[in-house]
Image: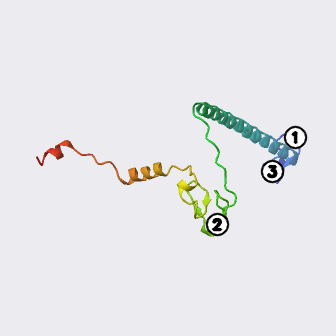
Amino acid sequence: VSVPCVGGCGFFGTAKTENYCSKCYSKKQKDEEDKDDKARKEKQEAEKKEEEAKKEAEGAAKEEAPEEEKKEEQKDKTKCWFCSKKCGLTGFECRCGYVFCSKHRYAEDHNCDFDHKGKGREILAKNNPNVAVSERGLLDGV
């Protein structure tokens, strides 16, 4: 059933197009898309401002702390990082992230930058919680 266009243009609309004629309906769709685009742009600009504020805060923190050096990535995992000898499947992957041959697999042999002692201490501290000794317990047997 045709009804007059809700847009007031004088043409007839249908229920399929929310009682708008085809031209008024397409105009309405464009207006809605423009509003959505405008809202997205405003949201993106707000996010950019937040990111810039975070970067500035991080920049201030970086000025206080020295910058960390970027670690070079090993491209060929079938060769030793230290001597470039082919090791294939028998290569040893270290905790520093590189693959080494049997000669350079130990940390002291390839100048490893991973803190093995610190990691060991963390594991021990995690597995062995501190035991508090009460003074009273020591003197009870005397």
The residue carrying mark 3 is: 17
Q: Position of residue 105 (x, y in %)?
A: 56, 60
Crowd around label 2: few <14 · some 14–19 · many ≥20 (10 Å): some
The amino acid sitting under disc 2 is: Cys
Look at 58% across and 32% down and name the residue there: 61
Crowd around label 3: few <14 · some 14–19 · many ≥20 (10 Å): few
Secondary structure of the residue carrying tag 2 is loop
The residue carrying mark 2 is: 87
The amino acid sitting under disc 1 is: Cys
Determine contact: label 1, label 3, CB under 8 Å. no
The residue mark sitting in front, 3 or 2, is 2
Secondary structure of the residue carrying tag 1 is loop
Residue most extreme to the bottom: 89
For this view, does 52 lie left or right of residue 25? Answer: left
The residue mark sitting in front, 2 or 1, is 2
Q: Quadrant of the N terminus?
A: bottom right
Front in this rendered view, residue 75 or 23: 75
Secondary structure of the residue carrying tag 3 is helix
The amino acid sitting under disc 3 is: Thr
For this view, does 98 lie left or right of residue 48? Answer: left
